[in-house]
Amino acid sequence: MAEHGKRTAIVVGAGIAGLAAALRLHRAGWRAVVVERAPARRSSGYMLNLIGGEYDAVERLGLLPALAKRDLGAFTSILVRADGSAKFTVPQAIVEAAQGARAMSVFRGDLETVLFEAVEETAEFRFGTTVTAIAQDAGGVVATLSDGSQERADLLIGADGLHSGVRRLVFGEESRLRVDLDHMVGAFPLHRVPADLAEGSGTTFIGPHRTAAVINLGPGRSSAFFTYRSADTEADLARGPAAALGEAFGDLGGGVPDALAQLEEDSGAYFDSVSQIRMDSWSDGRVVLLGDAAWCVTLFAGYGAGLAIAGADALGEALERHGADVTAALAEWEARLRPEAEKRQALARRGIARFAPPTRFHVWLSDMMMRSITLPGVRQLVERSIRNSR
């Protein structure tokens, strides 16, 4: 089980949660075997804002210097009508002031790259592989892999996302634990800079039940984000991102048509239903879930990447404190993390009205709130409110 006296963890999933866990456990003196379904590491993905607690989490793992080189920076935000014409503009300086000094924006793939580079020499990777069975005994956990091999370890971490295979094997079918919020989200990088949008700016259309955002930060640094209320999330998933987003947003102007055209050219978008995982316990013996596999706060809450990293960091701390008593470490870890995860899940449910307002009146209220940020004296109140909500 151990190599040169080290305890071993099988980490299922080479995304943010899994890589952060492998990094933190290595620092705690563990050996990590990372099992990833994909045949190779993915490198694209949507834009993440690392603000407040998220910034703190990446700083604790020593990732800030590498991430700073990939920081996308703040940008001018333009609220637009359906035809793409501007309603009003929030200048970059105000966006930066609202975010504060401890903030950066990076592509998800860049965060994963930085994590991978930090752990690639110390973890063992098994790409193109899944876990097909999990068994436990008094001394550890045994994972049977899709290549027919078995791996024995002191701990197995399921960091394999919303549709976790580890969770299904140990805790039961996803349908019993997933709560669908009746919305879809699509996000993807743009391979061409958006048409008719100045570099260093982004447009956001907010209408009843939907939002579309297109950001131009130059070649290789631009992205698009869409979310909308769905009458049938399973049907939308089956149709795929190009068809579903095309129908939901095909009437919009501005940079949206070009973004949707790029989506049709490249199907590598993140596209999924907005769902949360709600469980009474995140661990069973020596198997523990981490990140979206355990709680999935959703993009509506933000802080998903930060909570995954903070969770990995806290898990490493708990394992260091409890030594060989893995179950005690997991119990302490969950007691520490659960309040924050549940808080973020509640924020996401309340935040639906911000991302997909239910009525035109709610759209108007959203416009008024964003306009107010530019008024003298109000900005300081907004900054204080944002800090207190983190």
Image (cartoon, grey):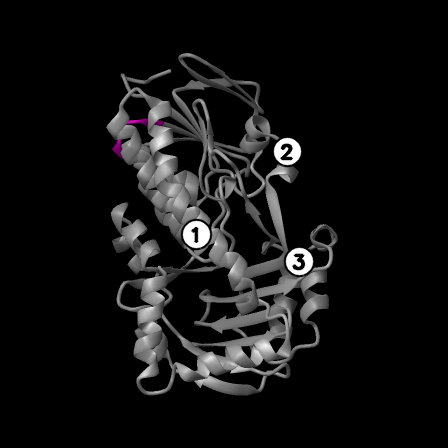
- Crowding around mark 2 (Cα neighbors within 10 Å: few <14, some 14 to 19, many 20+) is some
Looking at the image, which residue is at 41% across and 83% down?
A: 372
Residue at the disc numbered 1: 343
Q: Earlier in the sequence, mark 2 or mark 3?
A: 2
Asked whether the residues under the numbered discs 2 and 3 touch, taking CB atoms below 8 Å apart as contact, a structural biologist would say: no
Residue at the disc numbered 2: 173
Query: Secondary structure of the magenta portion, mostly?
Result: loop
- Compared with 347, 221 (above or below) is below
Amino acid identity at mark 2: Glu
Residue at the disc numbered 3: 241
Q: Quadrant of residue 182?
A: bottom right
From which residue to which does the magenta span run? 27-31
Amino acid identity at mark 1: Lys
Disc 1 to disc 3, how far (Cα)? 30 Å
- Compared with 48, 258 (above or below) is below
* Horizontal and vertical percent position of residue 18: 42, 38
- Crowding around mark 1 (Cα neighbors within 10 Å: few <14, some 14 to 19, many 20+) is few
Residue 367 in magenta stretch: no
Amino acid identity at mark 3: Pro
Residue 120 can be seen in this image: no
Looking at the image, which residue is at 31% across and 70% down?
A: 384
Element at label 2: loop
Left or right of 278 on screen, residue 360? right
Left or right of 135 on screen, residue 55? left
Element at label 1: helix
* Horizontal and vertical percent position of residue 65: 25, 54
Disc 1 to disc 2, how far (Cα)? 25 Å
Circle 1 or circle 3, nearest the eye? 1
Q: Earlier in the sequence, mark 1 or mark 2?
A: 2
Looking at the image, which residue is at 26% across and 51% down?
A: 59
For the N terminus, the quadrant is top left
- Crowding around mark 3 (Cα neighbors within 10 Å: few <14, some 14 to 19, many 20+) is many
